[in-house]
Amino acid sequence: MSRLIAVIVLTLAVLLPLHALAAGLPAAAKPEDVGLSSARLALIERTLRTEVETGRIPGAVVLVARKGRVAYLTSVGLRDPNSKAPMTPDAIFALASMTKPMASVAAMMLYEEGRLLLNDPVSKYIPAMGKMQVGVERTDATGKVTVLLVPVEREMTIQDLLRHTSGLTYNNRGTTAVHKLYPDTPTVRSAGPDEFIALLARAPLRFQPGTKWEYSHATDVLGRVVEVVSGTSLGAFLQGRVWTPLKMTDTAFWVPADKQARLARPFDKDPATGKAPDMRDVTTPPKFECGGGCAVATAADYARFAQMLLNGGSLDGVRILGRKTVAYMTSDHLGPNVSRGGDYSPGDGYGFGLGFAVRTSDGVASTSGSAGDFHWSGAYGTSFWVDPKEQLVVVTMMVNPSPTRGHYRLLMRSLVLQALD
């Protein structure tokens, strides 16, 4: 098997320019033409090949673009561990939370058109969200925990949804009594948009809006706001206003039958935990096109989206957002008055903008990078980052819904950045 994988890797490396051009990406370039080292980039392939051969991941696709041109595209390992189908550059991946930046862009397009403002209360568009109160836990002398509801000091706003300061949370984000009052994953996956909002609105807020960052269903609510304001589904809005204009031909909220042979699939059991992966079924349309985690895409498609952001909102003559809007989104929106806590997943050295983590300095963070770079990732193993200073776009796609996924995000950072000349 290891020899077969090596042959696949070498074959795809030779075909890199053809694949890049066929995918509709910016023109392919030799790495040296854009300030990258071919020899040092080869370390990415060798490292991932070892990870595949030792059974840690099924496979991966990595795309690196610099100065608007694709300099590296490789696919390693297997697209389907059961059928042994090889990984290909056009494999389709479930994005999970890498959907969030796209939903955030949709909301900012409506902001640019004056159809919503960021200081608008969410209840202006979804009245049920205005009735939520904050849950404060109290423990009595016997150890019994109760949740006391207190009024909000101010309602959550659209900006709170974008930067995760809404007071909302996820059921699996913690084990407190408040977390347990949120709908669990199976319940959320089976709900339609109105049912989802009703379920969420019955739970208490975890904290006062605007006071703390906590990863949450906020972007799912934001996607619903986009639907209410635009009068169409989130998928239809993104298809018409983002995906089609950017030629993201394989991006959607589910994978139709004629494309399912390209869907990347996980191991039956996670090598790190021994458990079956808990992943959304993306082969059927979801009842709710959730902005927080329901989309699928190829590496090439997502690279076009990321390149649009690096370019200040446009790509190939198509403008999606204004330059100042992208600059606003990629600035830190937390500030000194927002608590980050021990569960602040962007980590030290990063703030949070409107849809993604934003690096605030060259140092401090546990991985190399540049002040101003921004990124996000998905729970199933996908990730991307954009470094405006280095004019870099990097997309890593793998099906790895495992605690080890964070390791690969950091690993790809070091492997790509060490290749800069």
Image (tube, rainbow, N blue to C red):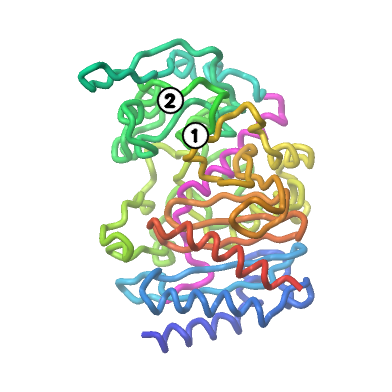
Three-letter residue code for mark 2: Arg
Q: What element carries label 1?
A: loop
Location of residue 34 in the rendering, given as x and y in whole percent from the top left corner? 78, 71
Placement of the C terminus among the 4 image quadrants: bottom right
Height in image: 195 above or below 379? above
Q: Quadrant of the N terminus?
A: bottom left
Looking at the image, tell me whether mark 2 or mark 1 is earlier in sequence order.
2
Residue at 27% in and 58% down = 276
- Residue drawn 75% across and 56% down? 316
Residue 193 image offset from top left, x and y in percent = 41, 30
Seen from the viewer's position, the closer of residues 39 and 218 is 39
Q: Is residue 345 left or right of residue 355?
A: left
Q: Residue at x 75, y 49 (%)?
A: 314
Q: What stretch is highlighted in magenta?
A: 86-115
- As drawn, the label of residue 206 is 2
Q: How crowded is mark 2: few (under 14 residues within 10 Å), some or many (20 or more)?
A: many
> Circles 2 and 1: CB distance less than 8 Å?
yes
Label tally: 2
| Residue receiving disc 1 | 214
Q: Can you give x and y, in whole percent of width and height, for residue 48 in the image?
A: 49, 74
